[in-house]
Amino acid sequence: MKLPYQNASVVFNKLVVNTVEDISGIFIGTNQAIAWSNYRKSNQGFGSLKESVLINAVNVVNDQDLIDASVKDVKNITLAEEGQTLKQCAVDFESINAISVLNGSAIDIGENSQIAWSSSHKNNYGTGKSYGNNRLKQVANQVIDNDVIDAHVENIIQNSEYTGGENQEIRVTQKK
């Protein structure tokens, strides 16, 4: 794969992020996000709650697989940049406000590349995630997950190569 000449100029006054989960990302400026992958398995007796009331509930998760959530993620990536290209990236910003950035998430500003990122996630919840103001009363959860092999992940990256040009110009400033 050949990466072309790149020139990015981004100007913004405000970026507010409340939640970025798993392998999500916010990339500003010149960037490549190549070969990202995300594998997620979730068992929930009762899903997520937000501003809720849950009374007199029994949540049962019975997940007894022989092999549960097996993932083999193989990447063979070869990147080469054309000659002596000039990369220019100018980013001007006033503020960034990120309340929550979880797991393999990223907020990147300016020249960046995330080659072959991977994320694997497995949960078993009797009651799922609770967001905000919730009230749970007389709730019973039972999670049975007697897998022989549980959440096996084999992530292989082969021949990953990045050859960048020598002339890179990056300017990141915060406006006041």
Image (cartoon, rainbow, N blue to C red):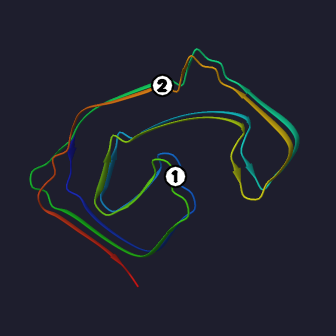
Q: Residue at x 15, y 47 (%)?
A: 163
On screen, 67 above or below 81? above
Q: Which mark identifies residue 117?
A: none
Q: Give x and y (percent) for residue 159.
A: 21, 32
Classify 10 Å Cα crowding around label 1: few (below 14), some (14-19), many (20 and above): few
- The quadrant in which the C terminus is found is bottom left
Residue in the foreground of this view, choosing between 59 and 31: 59
Label 2 sits on a secondary structure element that is loop
Q: Residue at x 56, y 64 (%)?
A: 99
Classify 10 Å Cα crowding around label 2: few (below 14), some (14-19), many (20 and above): some
Q: Which residue is mark 1?
A: 102
On screen, 145 above or below 46? above
Q: Which mark identifies residue 152?
A: 2
- Left/right of residue 5 with respect to residue 109 in the rendered view: left
Quadrant of res 125: top right
Label 1 sits on a secondary structure element that is loop
Which residue in the rendered view is the most extreme toward the right? 56
Q: Disc 1 marks which amino acid?
A: Leu
Which residue in the rendered view is the most extreme toward the top? 66
Q: Disc 2 marks which amino acid?
A: His
Quadrant of res 27: bottom left
Compute the Cα span from label 1 to label 2.
Answer: 22 Å
